[in-house]
Image (cartoon, rainbow, N blue to C red):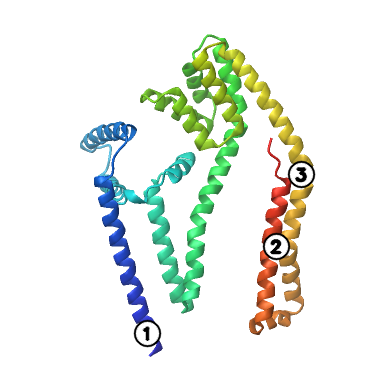
Amino acid sequence: MSSLNQDLITVILLTVFLFCAIGVILIGNWVYKNGPLSKKQERITRFVASSLVDSQETPARGSLTPSKWDIGKFRDWINEYLSSLSSDKLQIKLSSVYWAVTDTEFILICIVATVLTFLLGWLITGKILGGIFLAVIAIMVPRILLNRAIAQRQQKFHTQLLDVLVMVKGAVQAGYSLMQALDLAVKEIPNPASEEFGRVLREIRLGITLEATLFNLTQRMENDDLQIVVTAIIINSQIGGNLSTVMEASISTIRDRMHLMGEIRSLTSYGRYVGYFMTMLPFIAGFLIFLVSPDYFDVVKTSSLTQIIFLMAFFGVFIGNIWIRRIIQIKV
């Protein structure tokens, strides 16, 4: 009887999920067909449409296989009918790491992975809580991987920024324009700096202003040193002046900031390691106690008071770790 009820619940949940998916598709289709487009979106749409026309000719020349073309049409269909799931913030994040997925596809992958892990956890453990636990993990993991990839890419860009600025300043002093200097830097500097400044040049060639392209770059990289350089370049382009002098002042400021940030990082290293040690100490102690006396934690299974105390202790460790991180976080 219990297995029959469980199968009935499974069928009900799958039916609800199917209706929800159909509803999302219909709502997304309606929003896409009836939502207004901005002038920039219309211009980009025309550009993409012309690119699609060109790409339709390439399979006839044998550059694209039929399977790849079918996958491309399927992805276009997904992005069209599920466009209501799109998020500007997520678009910026995905463009920061150059992942070969759109924001709609990323959200759809997260939804499918969450549902599949929920059903898998439910079938393996036989309990809904097991499915919910795996579903929560499936929700968190893609976001964690995305944020980690963004942080690593931004850190690499930060280490290359000074070399790019020195090269641009030298090219400007040699008589190059700013666009020519950036093009030279794109050819000489490795990724990710070459990709980011190459994207700036491509956006300018598409008709976007210099201020808008540099603003997009600062949004993707979220770097204070880059913000200083962008502000200086925009002011120089608006009021005029010697660009090489402006670049020299920006380079000097960034070097001083890097030196100061290095000193702060060395002075706060003790606090960081103490925070890591204090966070891991309860778990290490609990593991050692379990190795010495495996029956020591049996009371946790039966005592509600002990379970509450364990939850409070875990919450306290979490809050303490965040507190220590906030204390040693010094903005320059």
Q: Nearer the viewer, residue 99 or 137?
A: 137
Q: Are marks 1 and 2 in contact (CB under 8 Å)?
A: no
Three-letter code, disc 2: Val
- Residue 33 visible in rendering: yes
x and y percentages locating residue 265 in the rendered image: 74, 40
Q: Are marks 1 and 3 in contact (CB under 8 Å)?
A: no
Pointer 3: what residue?
268
Q: Residue furthest top?
A: 175
Q: Quadrant of the N terminus?
A: bottom left
x and y percentages locating residue 102 in the rendered image: 38, 45
Using a 10 Å C-alpha cutoff, classify the residue at mark 2 as few (fewer than 14 neighbours), some (14 to 19) or many (20 or more): some
Three-letter code, disc 1: Asn
x and y percentages locating residue 285 in the rendered image: 76, 68
Q: Quadrant of the C terminus?
A: top right
Q: Could you tell me how many numbered marks the image carries? A: 3
Pointer 2: what residue?
317
At 65% from the left and 18% from the top, the residue drawn is 249
- Left or right: 146, with 303 as reference point: left
The label number, if any, that marks residue 135 in the structure image: none
Mark 1 and mark 2: span between their CA atoms?
Answer: 41 Å
Residue 209 figure quarter: top left
The label number, if any, that marks residue 5 in the structure image: 1
- Left or right: 294, with 216 as reference point: right
